[in-house]
Image: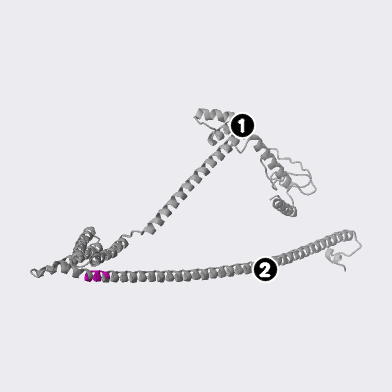
Amino acid sequence: MSTIEKVNGHAPGSTSHAESWARAGIADAEAEAIRARTAAEIEERRIKAQAEAEALLIAAREEAEKQRIANERAALRFEREKAEQLAKIAEAEAKRQETERQAAAARAAEAAERAAVEERQAKREQSAGSWRRAALSFAVVCAIVALPVQMSAFWSPSAPWLLVAPLVLEGGAWVVLKGAAAAVDDHRPHWHYRAIAWVLAFIAAGINFAHGVTAFDLATAIGTAFASLAGPGVWDLHEHGRIRKRDGKLTWRQRREQRAAEAKAAKEKTAAEERARAEQAAAEQSAARDAEKLATERAEHFPKVWARAEQLAAALGETTVTESVWKRAYNDIEGTDPHESVDIIRSRNAAARRVLAARSEAPGSDPVKVTNAQRASQMPPSGQRREYRPPARAGIRRPGDTQRYVSAARKQAAITAKNATKDAR
């Protein structure tokens, strides 16, 4: 018995058998359609899964390629940063070595300068010591030479104690000179000490000369008189140099060089002042020419504004059209700052519109206005002209105004709208 017979429970040949056979055929057809749909759905799912797998594989490959490129770029960036860091380290090391070399050279130069200063100081001290000893020795020799003639002048058998007088004269002069030296060291007035010493020295010289001429000869008189003056004089000369050194006074040569340097500096200062005055005068003349040229150009290119500026300047008490007056006059006439005008603003706006149209134009097509997807309609923009028909009440959308799309259509519309939005951005 066939499957249909088993289903109906009747044998073929009767009237009900025909109906059973028809129902069985319909059931078989429906089963076959179900199997076909199922197979189609399975095949569709398989194709979709295969497409998704291929898409995932392609995406994975693209991601791997991107990762490889990113790794290569990171490696290159690391190598570049490493090379830059090494270069900076080498530069820093070179600078450090150069700094150390300069510091060592500076220390060597300082040490050499210090040694030279010490050597000069030692030479000065040695020379000063030699000069002091020589002056003192010369003064002692002069005293030895001058003293016998003075003692001869004061000798008297009836008054032998008068031999002390020459010692008082010569010793007094030296005592007073020592007082002058002490005053110099103590930064006290010393001129009166030196004056008394010279008075005593001249008295001793006068006695030597008078007694030498009468008792001996002219040469002896002159020699002993000179010895009485030369000894204290040389020592006073030594003290005079020490005083000038202490007070920091300049020598004749130094004073002459100083005067020459001051005269040169004054001459250079005068020349610099004259140059500055000449440059200032030239700058003022140039500024005046530029201002005159600017005024002429403004009056030529903006006659209305210039007339208004002259009125404002006269009203405000300005002798010339200043920048503030010009800006105010320009704003009164043109309504904007001096760098703009109505025509310039209109030209800028027109140029901006042309740039927008040029950027929205695709190659080989006419310019179109680019709008965001889903702004005026629920469908993305297309190449065909579409007539938009809003609901009865404008501005209000309700469920059921348009027919609901199937799931696949909604997904495709969303993908298309998303891509259109990306392209518009």
Is residue 142 located in the magenta-colored stretch of the structure? yes
Determine the secondary structure under disc 1: helix
Instruction: Answer whether labels 1 and 2 touch (C-beta < 8 Å).
Output: no
The local crowd at label 1, few if under 14, some if 14 to 19, many if 20 or more residues have their Cα within 10 Å, is: some
Among numbered discs 1 and 2, the one appearing first in the sequence: 2
The answer to whether one can see residue 293 in this image is yes
Which residue is drawn at the image coordinates 52% and 71% (left, top)? Answer: 97
Relative to 59, say whether 368 is above or below.
Answer: above
**Quadrant of res 368:** top right
The answer to whether one can see residue 394 in this image is no
Q: Nearer the viewer, residue 210 or 353?
A: 210
Stretch in magenta: 138-144
In the picture provided, is 327 more to the left or to the right than 34? left
Q: Which mark is residue 392?
A: none
Residue on which disc 1 sits: 299
Q: Position of residue 157 (x, y in %)?
A: 9, 70
Determine the secondary structure under disc 2: helix
Number of numbered labels in the structure image = 2
Q: Position of residue 186 (x, y in %)?
A: 24, 63
Q: Of the residues tagged 1 and 2, which is closer to the observer?
A: 1
Residue on which disc 2 sits: 72
Going by the numbered disc 1, the residue's amino acid type is Ala
CA separation, marks 1 and 2? 65 Å
Farthest left residue in view: 158
Query: In which quadrant is the N terminus drawn?
Result: bottom right
Is residue 200 located in the magenta-colored stretch of the structure? no
